[in-house]
Every structure is written in C-alpha cells, then in structure tokens.
Amino acid sequence: MADIIVQPPEPGQMLDLIRLFGNDRPVEMELGTGKGGFLLERARSLPELNLFGVEWANKYYRFAAKRMAHWEVTNVRIMRADARHLLIHHLPDDSLTALHVYHPDPWPKKRHHKRRLFQPGFVEAVARVLRRRSRLFVQTDHREYYTWIHDLLTAQPGLNIEKAGALDRQTPQATPGTNYEIKYLRQGRNIWYLIAARP
C-alpha cells in the first residue's frame, strides 16, 4: 500500500506526476474518491492510464487505498488533501487528460456557498491543468448546484461545455457508475451531469 498512498506536496511545490507514477502515461484525476469504486473500475479497465485520486475524509481515503492494494492495481495513487488547494497551487499546467468530480458537497445553504468546490478560481485552475482536448466530467444530484456549475463553466473561456443535462442510465456512459450515482438512481433521484473540454 506504500506505493499507492502519496503525501501532499510542500508549500510552493509543484507535483511531478512522472516521478509520482514512475512513467509518463496519461494521468486522470478524481477529486473526492470516497470509497474508491469509480477509481478502481477505471484503473482495472484502463491499465494504460494513471489514476490519481484525492480524498479529504481520512476514513474513506484509507479505505480506498486498501481497496486498491487488495486488487493489486499498480496504476493508482491516492492522496489525502484539500482538492481545491491542490489543483490551484500544486498541479502543473497541461498535466491531466481528464478530471472527474462526482457528487461534490453542494453546501445548499446560501451562507455556505463559499465552501463549494466549484468557484471561479477553481474553474480557472481546471482549464489550466487540463491538456488541450481533455475533459472535465461532473455529476451532482443537486439541481441548483448543477446550475451554479454550469454558469461557472460557461463563463470560463478556457472550457467549452460539450454535453449537459439529466443523466439517463439507460444510455451507455463513457465511465463506470459511482457509488452515489448507483444509489441515487436506485432511489429514483435525478442526477445532472456536465462534460466540458479544453478546446
């Protein structure tokens, strides 16, 4: 498990993803890995990719790391860190081929909106760290947060929204379902998604 868990960078330090993974394969990142279900399926089905998971909750971060070790996946690294801070301050330009953000905390009360992951500075960083023609994938079950994210992405000239709307699980998706997605669809809840690309 020592190879899977990586320590957060020091203040002012940029991550060296080639050194982190020991190769120069394309890197996809998931912010908020939870128990690691999506990350594991992605890593097992696409061994030619490097998968970098970021999780703040210590319990889930350790659970996900143990899960990867159990399945002996070698193309995953997991870090316990603040996702927004990491992306803005420690990721190099043009370093990711995809960024996955599924069901981030919507902080529904207006006075808590400043705690949301999606803010102008975060979206600007997303456009910076994605390689050209690479994509951001987002899901949420919170309609107002979906609108909030949609407006932020629309206002960011470094990103173009390619697809957005209500998720229909009857239509084959490009990525495996997350734990939240599977749970919410079983409950009959609506899920909204956005796919934005760096042109």
Image (cartoon, grey):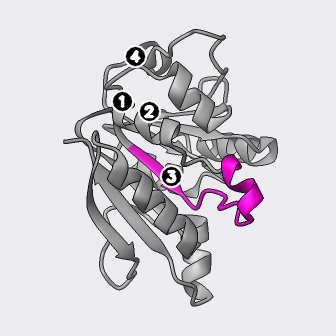
Instruction: Say which amino acid is labelled 2.
Output: Ala
Of badges 3 and 2, nearer the viewer stands 2
Looking at marks 2 and 4 on the same chain, the residue that comes earlier in the sequence is marked by: 4
Spatial CA distance of label 1 from label 2 is 5 Å
Residue 141 visible from this viewpoint:
no
Q: Position of residue 188 (x, y in %)?
A: 57, 90
Of badges 3 and 4, nearer the viewer stands 3
Q: Secondary structure at mark 1?
A: helix
Q: Residue at x 60, y 24 (%)?
A: 3
Looking at marks 4 and 1 on the same chain, the residue that comes earlier in the sequence is marked by: 4
Assess disc 1: are there few (<14), some (14-19) or many (≥20) residues with their C-alpha within 10 Å of its C-alpha: many
Spatial CA distance of label 4 from label 1 is 18 Å
Image disc number at residue 128: 1
Of badges 2 and 4, nearer the viewer stands 2
Taking depth in this image into account, of 169 and 106 the one nearest to the observer is 106
Q: Residue at x 79, y 41 (%)?
A: 58
Looking at marks 3 and 2 on the same chain, the residue that comes earlier in the sequence is marked by: 3
**Which residues fall within the magenta stretch?**
99-115
Spatial CA distance of label 3 from label 4 is 22 Å
Image disc number at residue 125: 2
Which quadrant would residue 2 be assigned to in this image? top right
Looking at marks 1 and 3 on the same chain, the residue that comes earlier in the sequence is marked by: 3
Of badges 1 and 3, nearer the viewer stands 1
Assess disc 4: are there few (<14), some (14-19) or many (≥20) residues with their C-alpha within 10 Å of its C-alpha: some
Instruction: Say which amino acid is labelled 4.
Output: Ile
